[in-house]
Image: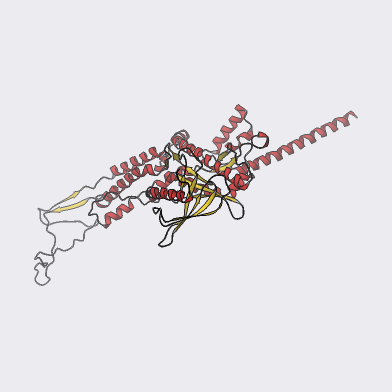
Amino acid sequence: MTDASPAALARQLLAILHKDGSRLHRIDDYLHGRHADPYMPPSADDEYRLLARRAVSNWMPLLVGTPAQALYVDGYRPGQAAGGLPTEVQTTSAEWSHWQRSRLDARQAAVYRGALAYGHAFTVTEKGTAGLVRTKGLSALKTSALFEDPATDDVPYAALTITAKPQGETRGRARMWDARHEYEVLFRSLGDKDGITVTRVRRHGASECPVTRFAALVDLEGRTFGVIEPMIALQDRINQTIFDLLVAQTYASVKVRTATGMAPPIRRDPETGEPVLDDDGNPIPLPINHNARRFLFAEDADVKFGSLDETPLGGFIESVDMSIRHLAAVSQTPPHHLLGQIANLSAEALLAAETSLSRKIAEFRTAFGECWERVFRLSAELSGVGNADDYQGEVIWRDMESRSLAQAADALGKLREQLGIPAKGLWRRVPGVTQTEYEDWEEMAEDEDSVRQLSTAITRATGANSGFAEAA
């Protein structure tokens, strides 16, 4: 960098938001169902435009929610305890207390959904007025960060988030962090480089920028990708096909009755019986009250009745199914998640269908797990409790795979009997078990073990006394 002053950093960060704004807002529009209109002729009337609005079938939230619902941090295991001994996951650790204080059990989902939708999201870890350290999420639409190497660095040297947008004469407001300080930034617009004012607020207390980037996918150029942007073309194709289906269903899905050689009845003067003419001298036809309950007949033998066949809708429906299958294949989403066709599928077939999704989720867990570990190191440094240099810590993800309890119990029993794995080492593999339940089981096991030891001691003492009495 040639200029690392706070004002120069603020200009660069606001310029990033300005440059990426149109792309991110387009992704946001598709996420919330504001899609591009399907093709319509320039002379389309209001009825056509109503059908275009109804043709929007928003699949994007499902593409984001399916992997996000399988991401749930359930614990944190620090790297090493005192003396270099391995540690256990505990809900009473300083790192997990920070997690609970920040209410990240519920708020972590918003971070994952933001990163999956836009390609990246952010968190900031900071000490509040009461001296307690908390972490909260930051939106990708309002936040940007600068890295020396955006492809490999996990520590930004500066970050900015907008807290208030400019309105009229009132300038916008933002918070900015570098390696030491927090700043307040006032700006007129994202593209105005001259109307920026930067004021130092305080030292944030960390040895590096307290903002952490959660990136779903990062290439070697440092570009981040989510799951929505690559699917926009397929989403538009589905919307266009459904629009064509609605047009055919509305205008051409029923048979059209025809009659040739029949003159329509005309309005006549009730006194003279003469035809009533319009301003152009043409007879005024009478409306024909015809519906499915009425029959048409004619006295003239030259009149012929016929019908025009309806347009088959099966081709449109097959086209929609094909596009959804393409969407499932490209997004690595199991087809039965999108189509709802799950009948007559065995457990092996379901497992094979979800293999691709499981691999994608494992990739996201690896990326997001490293980010949470940096958050825990920041919280330890800011609070002074815990190890701020713990690079061996591990985030524990909850097992969210769809397995029945009976299958899991059978498999765990075989691991215990055939491989000799201790029963306690298999507890975490029980489907749906939480860290709190695991610790409760440990306490119950210790209580049962204490009772067993006491019972054994009493039995031995009683047996010894009985033998001594018989000998006497």
Q: Residue furthest top?
A: 418
Relative side of 217 to 461, left or right: left
Residue 233, image x, y percentages: 33, 43
What residue is rendered at 61% in x and 51% in y? 132
Which quarter of the rendering shows the N terminus? top left
Q: Residue furthest right?
A: 472
- Quick one: 347 or 117, which is closer to the camera? 117
Q: Residue furthest front?
A: 2
Q: Is residue 187 above or below residue 427?
A: below
- Quick one: 380 or 56, which is closer to the camera? 380
Residue 401, image x, y percentages: 51, 39
What residue is rendered at 63% in x and 38% in y? 88
Which quarter of the rendering shows the C terminus? top right
Visible in this render: residue 269? yes
Residue 16, image x, y percentages: 41, 48
- Quick one: 293 or 219, which is closer to the camera? 219
Relative side of 5 to 304, left or right: right
Visible in this render: residue 143? no
Q: Total of numbered circles in the picture?
A: 0
Relative side of 278 to 426, left or right: left
Q: Is residue 73 above or below residue 352?
A: below
What residue is rendered at 61% in x and 37% in y? 79
The figure's colour scheme reads secondary structure
Q: Is residue 326 above or below residue 250?
A: above
Residue 136, image x, y percentages: 53, 50
